Amino acid sequence: MTGLTRVMAEVAREVVVMIESDKISRRIPNLELAWSSIDTLITDSQLDDDLKRAIEQTGTDVICADT
């Protein structure tokens, strides 16, 4: 499945990932993309500010929705 995820990301115009903030630091079995491969991350407002800045420095836009 990870190979398929990478191929889909490579041919997509835009890659958007939605994930709960407490799962961001965990290894996600079916999503093995580098942050630089993800255009937009949508998560909840509990995301740590330092982690948010680190992700944004890779070029990924981070949207934190109110929970």
Image: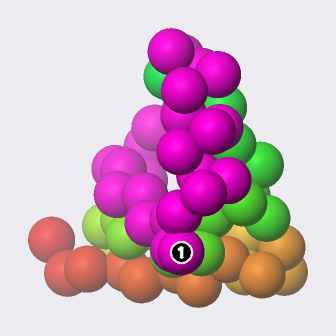
Whether 17 is among the magenta residues is yes
Q: Nearer the viewer, residue 19 or 11?
A: 11
Q: Residue at x 31, y 67 (%)?
A: 44
Q: Quadrant of residue 37?
A: bottom right
Q: Quadrant of residue 3?
A: top right
Q: Residue at x 53, y 74 (%)?
A: 13
In the drawing, does residue 58 fall left or right of residue 9?
right
In the drawing, does residue 30 fall left or right of residue 65?
right
Whether 6 is among the magenta residues is yes
Task: Judge whether 33 appears above or below 28 on screen.
Answer: below
Residue 49 seen anywhere in this rendered image of the structure: no
Specify the amino acid type for callout 1.
Answer: Arg
Q: Residues within 10 Å of mark 1 (few under 14, many from 20)?
A: few
Number of numbered discs present?
1
The residue singled out by tag 1 in the image is 13
Scheme by which the image is coloured: rainbow
Image location (x, y in percent) of residue 54: 80, 71
Task: Judge whether 11 appears above or below 5 on screen.
Answer: below
Q: Nearer the viewer, residue 55 or 50?
A: 55
Mark 1 residue element: loop
Q: Nearer the viewer, residue 3 or 52?
A: 3
Q: Residue at x 34, y 57 (%)?
A: 18
Image location (x, y in percent) of residue 23: 46, 38
Q: Residue at x 50, y 15 (%)?
A: 1
Task: Judge whether 46 appears above or below 60 on screen.
Answer: above
Residue 58 seen anywhere in this rendered image of the structure: yes
In the drawing, does residue 20 fall left or right of residue 66?
right
**Extreme residue toward the left, this view:** 67
Q: Which range is magenta? A: 1-29
Image location (x, y in percent) of residue 7: 63, 39
Quarter the C terminus occupies? bottom left
